[in-house]
Image: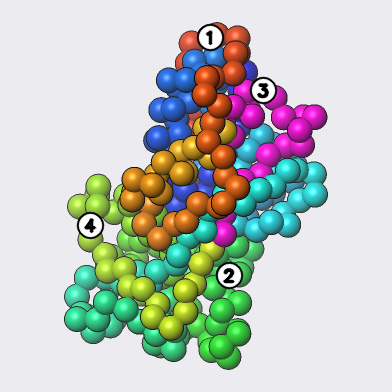
Amino acid sequence: GMVSVGLPATTVAALGLALVRRVHERYPGILLNVVEGMSGHLAEMMRLGKLDLSVLFSSDVTRDASVEPLLEEELFVFLPRGGALFPAQRTSITFAEVASLPLIVPTSEHGLRRRIAAEFEARNLAMRIVAEIDSLSLVMSCVHSGIAATIKPMSAALLEGERGRRLRALTISDVRLTRRNYLYSLPPKRLSPAAAAVASELRYTVREAIAAGDWVGAIAAADATAPAAAPVPLRRRAARATFHVMK
């Protein structure tokens, strides 16, 4: 059967291909429908029951779904190469120094923006926001061109190397700024065997990426479990996958 999975752009960059490959190889009877979007848009789709599964950044998106911790990501400050915005020899930055940088952030409905804003408020600091952009590729293009800095998990830069672009990623030296990722699924009575199988593969793919060192700055949740030893029997059909990017 069909399984619809909502993944934020950074999650797609970290494990999208690996997840599609695993489902394709182990469950040829599943039609995997992957929806890429900003967390706020995916949360609304989950609330409306338009997704079977989704990775989101808050544990209280809806009461009409099961939720479990999936992983925690460290957030980094991304800058263009060189020292136009910050001294080139520095490999870390204080939070007060982050406040002095021009920043590009998501709009306020999204979890990452709220997480960053909460840290600024806790320290009585103000953000120097030059743009609010809900497109990961455009944000990273703006950073690469020197317009501003941004705060993202390391997974945000995974595709930049493939595009031949290199950015600076600085750790924040006086605070470990992190973002929690949660796996949402339909309630057990509504969750199909196919969706349960994909959820299991997603958990495994997360652990595998972290263990291999491919997801820098990420720590798997303690209760994330590996998939079943053998695939769940499902009606066989030609393996297919569809991929949607929300605009």
Instruction: Determine which residue is flagged by label 3.
Output: 193
Q: Looking at the picture, how far across and down is residue 157, in whole percent?
A: 34, 57
Q: Are marks 4 and 1 in contact (CB under 8 Å)?
A: no
Q: Nearer the viewer, mark 3 or mark 1?
A: 3
Question: How much space separates mark 2 and mark 1, taking CA atoms?
Answer: 42 Å
Q: Quick check: is 238 in the magenta stretch?
A: no
Answer with left or right where residue 172 lies relative to residue 182: left
- Of label 3 and label 1, which has the lower sequence position? 3
Question: How much space separates mark 4 and mark 1, taking CA atoms?
Answer: 40 Å
Give amino acid for label 3.
Pro
- Of label 3 and label 4, which has the lower sequence position? 4
Question: How much space separates mark 2 and mark 4, taking CA atoms?
Answer: 27 Å
Disc 2 secondary structure class: helix
Q: From what the image shows, is residue 227 above or below residue 124? A: above
Give amino acid for label 2.
Arg
Instruction: Determine which residue is flagged by label 2.
Output: 115
Q: Are marks 2 and 4 in contact (CB under 8 Å)?
A: no
Instruction: Determine which residue is flagged by label 1.
Output: 237
Mark 1, other Cα within 10 Å: few <14 / some 14–19 / many ≥20: few
Q: Nearer the viewer, residue 40 or 201?
A: 201
Residue 224 makes an appearance in the image: yes
Answer with left or right where residue 43 lies relative to residue 75: right
Q: Quick check: is 192 in the magenta stretch?
A: yes
Q: Residue 165's mark? A: 4
Q: Looking at the picture, how far across and down is residue 121, in whole percent?
A: 60, 84
Residue 37 makes an appearance in the image: no
- Of label 2 and label 3, which has the lower sequence position? 2
Q: Which residues are magenta?
A: 180-199
